[in-house]
Image (cartoon, rainbow, N blue to C red):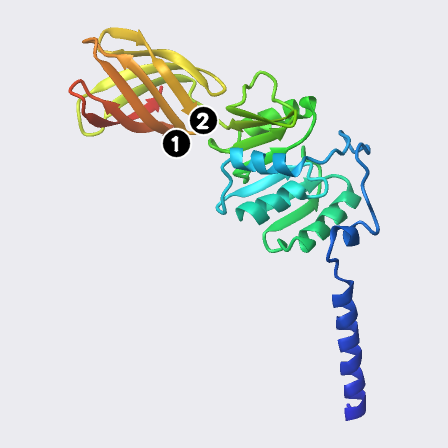
Amino acid sequence: MPRRFTRIAATAAMLVLAASIGAQPKTRADCEKDYKPQVGQSGKDVVWVPTPDELVTRMLRMAQTTAQDYVIDLGAGDGKIAIAAAKQFGATSLGIEYNPDMVKLAQCMVQVEGVGNKTEIIQGDVFKEDFSKATVVTMYLLPELNLRLRPIILNMKPGTRVTSHQFAMGDWEADETAEIEYRSAYLWIVPAKVEGTWAFREQGGNTQFSVSLNQNYQKVSGDAAMGTNKQPIVGATLRGEDIKFAFNDDKGVTRTLTGKVRDGEITGTLKTAGGGEIKVTGARK
């Protein structure tokens, strides 16, 4: 190619690049030039009302969000929660939004806030998209939508943190609540499934006992039998995969089990009659 045409081609390429750089949005106003949502506008199942910034931060703090988390916002709107998760807490985040215009707006906001390397906004239906890989789930939906999502959430990995603006999850009581300027935030920790009878054995020893557990979300009750003595468990707590409870053995000595529920087993430590601890493993019968 003649040098003159090479220069012309290079100049044209630089002009295109410059124009492209100049067209890059720099502010929220730039993003809203083509589409500006209105508070209260109708969506697929909800109306759009943005969550206040202070409450967004509180929700993510309640979930103890860190840079190791994968935050998925259900009904992302303009992307502010997904953006805050990345910008304030360093997390990787994904927003799922049904309205394609809102998706484009949120994608623009992601670029303006400089978190494009950590945050993605996609167009999709929260009841059809797979969000099972999330370690933190955020949402601002309606009560009936929360209830439709509840079975899906309860089947997520134990320890997944779920936080909601304003609306609860039916009879699944929140692990934590907060209120900012008359707006509520709720936090749930997905509990491990522990319902049933468990046979425990000391690892490398002779101690044996059984525990029958009843479960209502993160609330656990039941009884334990060591020898011929069956006693109710007391002080039971279940937070994600972490479980703890106490019971009296066949000599009337209080034993405390502290363990984790993983892969169909409960492994942990049991306080001995002498005040020490032994390692135990429980398998569900």
**Residue 230 percent across, percent down from the top left:** 28, 7
The residue where tag 1 is placed is: 262
Q: CA distance from mark 2 to mark 1?
A: 8 Å
- Height in image: 40 above or below 94? above
- Height in image: 40 above or below 19? above
Q: Residues within 10 Å of mark 1 (few under 14, many from 20)?
A: few
Name which residue type carries label 1. Answer: Arg
- Height in image: 203 above or below 84? above
Q: Residues within 10 Å of mark 2 (few under 14, many from 20)?
A: many
- Height in image: 245 above or below 118? above
Residue appearing at x 74%, y 54% in the figure: 27
**Residue 89 percent across, percent down from the top left:** 53, 45
The residue where tag 2 is placed is: 192
Tag 2 and tag 1, C-beta contact below 8 Å: yes
Q: Is residue 247 visible?
A: yes
Relative side of 228 to 172, left or right: left
Relative side of 249 to 68, left or right: left
Name which residue type carries label 2. Answer: Ala
Residue appearing at x 74%, y 67% in the figure: 21
Residue 226 image-quadrant placement:
top left
Mark toward the start of the polypeptide (2 vs 1): 2
Relative side of 179 to 218, left or right: right
